[in-house]
Amino acid sequence: MRKLLSVAAGGMALLVSFCAFSADYLIDVRTPQEFSEGHLKGAINIEYQNILNGAEALNISKEQDTVRVYCRSGHRAGIALETLRQAGFRNVENLGGFEELAKTMPAE
């Protein structure tokens, strides 16, 4: 995955491209309808029961990438977390419920 970094130097902005060795994925495991009613900024919607297919489609690395999941209350995110861990994903975190997260994180 390529990421871009903007660096200011001597009054002029330089665009530096570098290869990232890991990536962070924020995944909302609620239904598409729930997602459309509001979600965290930058989140990807993959329903919890489709989490493995979705992770494969995104080419998420089991060893290097960090996956953070959330839902309405944290329950479905917990199921998604366990599914990913059982499939060999190392860096998975359940962030809990959307309503609480939206109080401290940007939402759309």
Image (cartoon, grey):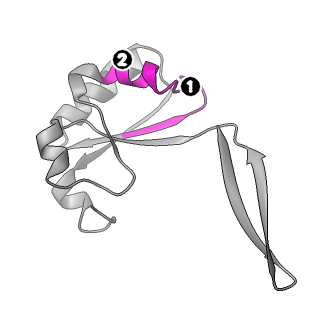
Residue at the location (52% across, 24% down)? 59
Q: Nearer the viewer, mark 2 or mark 1?
A: 2
Q: Residue 81 lies in what quarter of the image?
A: top left
Indicate the quadrant containing the N terminus: top left, top right, bottom left or bottom right. Answer: top right
Residue 63 counted in the magenta span: yes
Q: Residue 41 lies in what quarter of the image?
A: bottom left
Residue at the location (38% across, 14% down)? 86
Q: Residues within 10 Å of mark 1 (few under 14, many from 20)?
A: some
Left or right side of 47 for 22: right
Image coords of residue 68 (percent x, y): 39, 41
- Residue 72, relative to residue 86: is it above or below? below
Residue to which mark 2 is pinned? 53
Residue that extends furthest to the top in the rendered view of this protein: 87
Residue that extends furthest to the bottom in the rendered view of this protein: 11
Residue type at mark 2? Asn
Residue range in magenta is 51-68
Q: Residues within 10 Å of mark 2 (few under 14, many from 20)?
A: few
Image coords of residue 37 (percent x, y): 13, 53
Image coords of residue 73 (percent x, y): 14, 45
SS type, badge 1: loop
Give the Cα distance between marks 2 and 1: 13 Å
Count of numbered badges drawn on the protein:
2
Left or right side of 36 for 9: right
- Residue 93, relative to residue 47: is it above or below? below
Image coords of residue 34 (percent x, y): 13, 45
SS type, badge 2: helix
Q: Is residue 5 visible?
A: yes
Indicate the quadrant containing the C terminus: top left, top right, bottom left or bottom right. Answer: bottom left
Left or right side of 41 for 61: right
Residue to which mark 1 is pinned? 61
Q: Nearer the viewer, residue 20 or 77?
A: 20
Q: Nearer the viewer, residue 85 or 24?
A: 24
